[in-house]
Image (cartoon, helix red, strand yellow):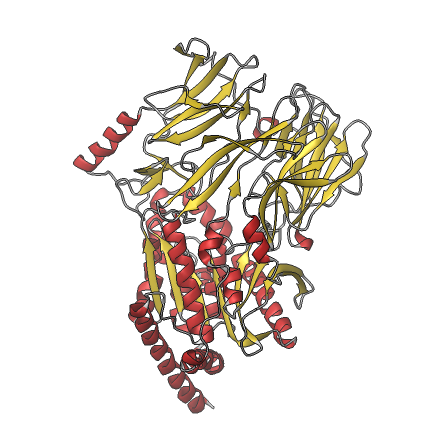
Amino acid sequence: MTVNGLWSCAPNRLSKVALAGVLALLSSAFPASAESISPRRLLEVVDFGPPVVSPDGRRVAFRVEQASIERNTYDTVWYVQSIDGDTVPRRVADGGPTLRDHVGTTLPTPAIWSPDGRWIYYRALMDGVVDVWRAAADGSGAEPLSLDAADVRDFSLSDDGLALAYSVGLTREEVAAAEQAEYDLGVRIDGSVPIGQGLFRSANNEGRLATQRYRGVWFQRAPLLAGVPDRWKSIRLDTRVVEALSPTEAPPPGPTAADLSDVSPSPWKIAHEKGGGRIALLSRAGEDRGLLQKPDIELAMLPSGRSRHVRTCLDALCVGKSIDRIQWLPGRDEVLFTVTDPDDALAQSMFRWNVETGAVLPVLRSGGLVSGGRDPSSHCGVSIRVLVCVMADADRPPHLAWIDIETGRSGPLFDPNADLAGDLRGVPVRTLRWKDALGRTFTGKFYPATAERERPSPLFVTHYSCAGFVRGGVGDEWPLVSLSQQGIAALCINQLPDYVLDPVERTGQGMAAVRSVVDQLASEGEIDRERVGMGGLSFGSSLTLWAATESDLLAAASVASNDVSYMYYLVNSLRGDTFLSVLKELWGLGAPEETPDQWNAVSTALKVDRITAPILFQQSEQEYITGLDLTIPLLRGHRADLYVFPNEPHVKFQPRHLLAVNERNLDWFRFWLLGIESSSTGRQAEYAHWRTIRKAFRADASHARSGHDMVD
């Protein structure tokens, strides 16, 4: 954008920041409203892991987890409950702290039932050790089984339930010694070292701070020496005798979609029939021109693992649907499949396809998620007649329910979030659907401002995914309900399902969603277009930064992760093609000297002078260094505030950190959009800095107005 172009849009935009400064003078006249649903309450929601039905179909085992602010961890508990719903769940064991992947999200930990239904087996972290545990289904006790010097990576139970096979890598002492040796002798830097984070024990991994290395694609990380191949062992459960297994004796790995790459069309997700040879498949179809993957999904079945001729579901309830989950119903010729509808704000519906007759029948339609937990693609527990699922919606926190497969009737099993659910009945959240100028349909969850304040209200927007019970958008960092109760309407927007490869078109698509809904809500008198804030994680961060440079929409912004920049390229280019090929594919970026026009188009760090809204950066220690060429100029110019959270990955998960992030975001947007400073948050030093930022933007606004007058 030219200098004249910058001046032509800057005065109106910067005047919004000045307006927020005027509103600050009114803060004493508008005391904060009562906050019945605080960020802490949203953080302390009880979540469920995948439920697993017992062999006789009468009981279900499941794990719940809940954040503990005081101990900065997550408490997990295993329960067993009768599916008839007539009894309360029986607590059978503690589950230990949650195990997490390299991104920071909870790993699924489904239980394995013993054939006789007496025990459940599960992997758990206890006292710094990852072991296989078993708990008596009647609640009489739980015990570790392997007691190995190395952490257990995987396990399986024999068909007769008499033996347990488990895999390990190096011992905990060997890994710790290797980490210490690097510390003492120096870390050799190569493409495997994540040099954007601490080099020594900087990541929280399975209960301890661990040294990491890149492993796999993109930014996938793993503990040091995690690449050592699995060593399998077997333990007889009656005698507790342990023996090493040879590679040929180890349990064979489960079949994957890659094993069926010669099937046409090639599947991306499969489900094997338990006790049978049939395989259900999901494959992508259609033209993928300009998209990351083909847009259509086909449901099919292979009669056996040796067959290569698929039987495709042709019913109207299968064709053209966004199917993302398949599983066999035990003892039946039916595949259960789930549609997550992008045109219905990611609401899920369940159907059953008879692979012999081709008939498809509906099972259940919901307004939110019906799955095995927070992940929309996680599995419900299944029996021959009943499903056990975790259900959640924007105004209904997660709870466990049973669903009759034949009739679709459902009923509650366990609802540990009942008190919060009751309070949420007073929150008027609703699903929005709207179109942009090109006729594209977008959806989102809208939380109108409920505090007694002047109308229309300010608006906060976050973008990416709003499935199930929405706490704070992707990453859970912006407390939507709390914002609405404080007088700021909040909106979570779902991205369109087809991932566009061109980054300018991709972010333009997101901007069209934001701009069109702001126009609609403002025209209806619902919100004040002069007081719009925005925040996000990952692509949500990129889109927020794009809005701050390419539009006049924002009065304040908050981002949780980095955008592409020269620093980002430099730090990660040591990884070679593993990084460079993806950067080229998803951003069209080569080396800066090779693709200068593309860099100028997509990198916020090269457009700092076009940022017209104050930005709050709350980033993980793992990532913030690669974005310093954006944040440092903004900090020096008093245009931003930066907080970094140690030992956090892409998605922050430590409860104290998440609470601090949510509360600061709430106060940040109250400051800029309502002009309110809270005297009860202990944030006086931060407010002083934010007032300095406000003065800098006022000066920019004054300079822009005078420059605009001169140009005119």
Q: Position of residue 29 (x, y in %)?
A: 44, 81
Depicted 112 relative to depicted 449: above or below:
above
State left or right for residue 432 relative to residue 641: right
State left or right for residue 272 relative to residue 696: right
* Quarter of the image where one finds residue 172: top left
Q: Residue furthest front?
A: 87
Q: Position of residue 34 (x, y in %)?
A: 48, 67
Residue drawn at x 37%, y 52% as measured from the top left: 657
Visible in this render: residue 612? no
Q: Position of residue 582 (x, y in %)?
A: 47, 46
* Quarter of the image where one finds residue 437: bottom right
Visible in this render: residue 260? yes
The residue lying toward the viewer, choosing from 300 and 122, is 122
Q: Position of residue 677 (x, y in %)?
A: 39, 73
Residue drawn at x 34%, y 68% as measured from the top left: 634
Depicted 103 relative to depicted 332: above or below:
below
